[in-house]
Image (cartoon, rainbow, N blue to C red):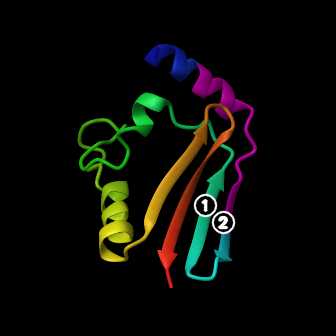
């Protein structure tokens, strides 16, 4: 399945016009920050791990895998908020941050 995903990823990337969109909403008791892209999406086997410490899709020595883990801890434990991800293969990914006011 990994090889098939890489082939699909290359097909998507070659025809992509990259787009990133950020939105901020005041929901009364909380602020919602959404960052979305139109990239290849995140496969479910990876999506379940992206907030784990030291998980990375980069080659050995090319990343620590702490970025999303630290972000998750800061948002959820440090600020009492939520961090969620919604993704659809070949359509894009959306990260949703909710922070209490």
From what the image shows, is residue 45 above or below residue 63? above
Front residue (pair 62, 49): 49
Mark 2 or mark 1, earlier in chain: 2
Say few, some or many: other residues with alpha carbon within 10 Å of mark 1 (under 14 / 14 to 19 / 20 or more).
Answer: some
Front residue (pair 3, 93): 93
> Residue at 65% across / 42% down in the picture?
92
> Residue at 69% across / 45% down in the picture?
38
Residue ID for mark 1: 35
From what the image shows, is residue 27 above or below residue 34? below
| Res. 22 image quadrant | bottom right
Say few, some or many: other residues with alpha carbon within 10 Å of mark 2 (under 14 / 14 to 19 / 20 or more).
Answer: few
Q: Which residues are magenta?
A: 8-22
Q: Is residue 44 left or right of residue 77?
A: right
Front residue (pair 21, 87): 87
Q: In the drawing, what numbered circle is on residue 22?
A: 2
Q: Is residue 29 left or right of residue 64?
A: right
Determine whether label 2 and label 1 are within 8 Å by CB: yes
> Residue at 59% across / 27% down in the picture?
9
Q: Is residue 91 magenta?
A: no
| Res. 25 image quadrant | bottom right
Image position, residue 48 (x, y; %): 39, 38
Q: SS of the residue at dot 1?
A: strand
Q: Is residue 21 magenta?
A: yes
Image position, residue 11 (x, y; %): 67, 24
């Amino acid at each position: 399945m990994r090889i098939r995903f890489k082939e699909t990823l290359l097909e998507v990337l070659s025809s992509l016009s990259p787009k990133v969109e950020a939105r901020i909403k005041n929901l009364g008791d909380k602020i919602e920050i959404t960052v979305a892209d139109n990239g290849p999406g995140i496969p479910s086997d990876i999506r379940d791990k992206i907030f784990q410490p030291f998980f990375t899709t980069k080659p050995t020595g090319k990343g620590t895998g702490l970025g999303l883990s630290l972000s998750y801890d800061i948002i959820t434990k440090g600020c009492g908020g939520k961090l969620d991800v919604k993704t659809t293969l070949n359509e894009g990914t959306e990260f949703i941050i909710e922070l209490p006011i």
